[in-house]
Every structure is written in structure tokens, then in C-alpha cells.
Image (tube, rainbow, N blue to C red):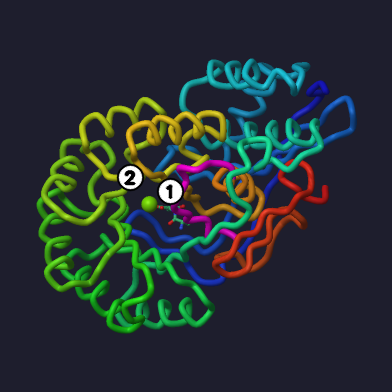
Amino acid sequence: MKITDIQCFDVEVPLITPFKTALRTVDKIKNIGVYIYTDEGQVGIGEAAPTAVITGETRESIIGAIQLYIKPAIIGMEIEEIALIMERIDQCLHKNTGAKAAVDMAIYDLFAKRYNAPLYKVLGGYRKELVTDITISVNDVQTMVDDSLKAVDRGYEILKVKVGKNQEKDVDRVIAIRKAVGPKVKIRVDANQGWSPKEAVRIIRKLEDADVNIELVEQPVHYANLEGLQYVTAHTETNILADESVFSPKDALKLIEMRACDCINIKLMKTGGIYQAQKIVHIAEAYGIECMIGCMLETKISVSAAAHFAASQKNTTMVDLDGPSLCLKDPVTGGPTFENQWIRMSDAPGIGFSI
Ligand SMILES: C[C@H](N)C(=O)N[C@@H](CCC(=O)O)C(=O)O
Ligand SMILES: [Mg+2]
């Protein structure tokens, strides 16, 4: 099955409520979709999220990377030569991980369709269902408490609470949410780089002393401050999850060897797709480090690819794939089903969309 063409299209979906982190506020997803066409009539689909504050990519850079660099590098290649295709994508330009991820997942969609199997089974087939957390945007304390209670009412058992925008209030935010939702709900805290290492230790210790029982704290400090991340990990009891500090397998290996984190958040938009993400999961597994599969602000297209990947591997024990739950509508039909916290894999070939 030969690649004959690659085309980009706009994926625009309003969010149910504004998404707010220490890094940005967004009320509408404006992503780039990718179709890969083949000589056998099969079409693969992917999506890239221009998350300039994290990957450095914009809508324009993604379209340019795909049309001017990636497309000429792989046009005419056989889908079955997936390792060779991935080598060409990796080598044709540096970084641009969202653009690479969109093409990578469309290739994997075609690869699994070629063998008439669902993608998660082609990749390893470890499980059929996933439980995702749901993001609670950073806001004033009462709004966050109300949003948390609504999420728990909808059946969510894991909350991902965004903090890091106003450090003085962060302890109050998390304590108030714990009091409101009770002891059974899991709470993940994501500071999105909002604290200094010393602030992070102070805040996390206060939460520990107050017995708030936090499952983990995600990316407490600036992405490039690896020693800072190491300091927080060494000086707190709570598990520290590296997010913006880990894009590549090399980044993962470095953090693991520095003992700078307890677990790693893998996102296809950071790794450049499934091919590199697999390497991180396996490196981490060799060191006994568990991985989360997360997403940026992405729709059902790319989050479904990430769900197939998360379902395929043993060491992807935590899931933050709430993108479709934050969207007012889905841009595609078919594929895995997203019903509040439950993501269930379908056995349709590839990612499973009706194109
Ligand atoms: C959407 C997901 N739950 C999430 O929080 N992802 C990121 C931030 C995504 C973005 O700004 O687009 C994270 O930091 O984990
Ligand atoms: Mg994060």
C-alpha cells in the first residue's frame, strides 16, 4: 500500500468551558487535521495541536512542516515499511513534534488497516478499556470546587486539578476540593511549571501535612530546570510526574538517571507520535517507572490514536485523555467511545473512524 498524497485540513471545535492552566487560557480548539491517501483507496487520519507555549508550534508551522518537509520525504513509500517511514519523518526536520505526530498516527491508522486489525491490537493489545481523569481548570477556589463536584456527579473518579497561577492560593484550592469531593476521589495536581523548586517543596509539604492525599504532582517547575525537578522529587513524599520536561526518549532517560521524577507523562504531540512514544514507555518500564498517556487540547481524532497507544501497553498505567470530554462536539464518528471517564476500544480496523 503506497502513500500517494498528504493533505491538511482545519479542525475547529468550541470547548464547553474555557480551559485554563498556568500557561494559557483557551476557549476554542483550532487544530490541523491530516489525511494520508494511498494507491489502494485507504485513507489514514491524524491531528496536530498547535501548542506554541509547549511545543513551539503554530498552525502555520505545522502546515509548513507537513507540506514542505514531511510529505516530500515519505511520498511513494510503502505503508508496510513503517520503520523506514518513521526514520525519514524523524530526519527530514528537527523538532516540530505535533506535525510529526499527526502524520505518524495517520500512518499507524493505515498500517493497522493494512492488516485489518484495530490499532491497539497491532501495537500490543494489553487492555480494551481505559479510565481517564478530567481537568479542573485553575480558577477561584469556589469555581474549582463547583467544577470538581460536577465532574464527580458525572462519574469521574480522578480529577486533574490545575494550579500554579497564584501560588499563595494553590494550597487552599486543593484542600477545598479534597474536602468537597471526599476521600475516595483521586486528585492529581498539575502546576504546569508555575512554581519555583523551593515554592513547590513548600506547597507539596503543606498538602502532605494536611493529609490531602494527592496521587501525584505534575511538572511543578520550569521545563528546563531539571535540577529543580530533581530537588522537588528528592524533598517530597508525593510522586512527581514529569510532563513538559520530557519530549524524547533521550529526555526520559536523562530524567530517570538523574532520579528527577517518579513517573512520566507521554503525549504524542511531544514525542512526535506513537513510534517514539513506544521507546519512552519501554525505557521507563525497564527502570520501573510508570507512564501516563496525556493529551494537549485535542479532539477525538488524535486522542483516539493516543487511546489506542495507551490501551496497547502494560506500562501506561495512568490516562489523561479528556480532550473529547472538553469539546462541544466530535469532528469524527466511530473509533473508541468516550463516555465520561470510560474510554472503550472498538475493534474496527485502524483507529476506527468512518471516513
Ligand atoms: C488536556 C489535558 N488534560 C491537559 O491538561 N494537558 C496539558 C496541557 C494542555 C494544553 O495546554 O494544551 C498538560 O499540561 O497536561
Ligand atoms: Mg501537564
At label 2, which amino acid type do we have? Cys
Q: Is mark 2 within 8 Å of ligand 2?
A: no
Snapshot quadrant of residue 182: bottom left
Residue 174 lies, in percent from the top left, at 26, 72
Magenta-highlighted residues: 312-324
As for residue 332 lying within the magenta part, the answer is: no
- Residue behind mark 2: 263
Image point 69% across, 31% down: which residue? Answer: 107
Q: Which mark is residue 292?
A: 1
State if disc 1 and disc 2 touch (CB < 8 Å).
Answer: yes
Above or below: residue 155 compared with residue 193: below
Above or below: residue 211 compared with residue 219: below
- The image quadrant where one finds the N terminus is top right
At label 1, which amino acid type do we have? Met
Residue 169 lies, in percent from the top left, at 20, 71
Residue 220 lies, in percent from the top left, at 24, 51
Neighbours of disc 1 within 10 Å: few (<14), some (14-19), many (20+): many
Image point 70% across, 18% down: which residue? Answer: 81
List the single residue furthest toward the right: 40
**Mark closer to the chain start, 2 or 1:** 2
Residue 133 lies, in percent from the top left, at 46, 63
Left or right of residue 138, residue 272 in this image: right
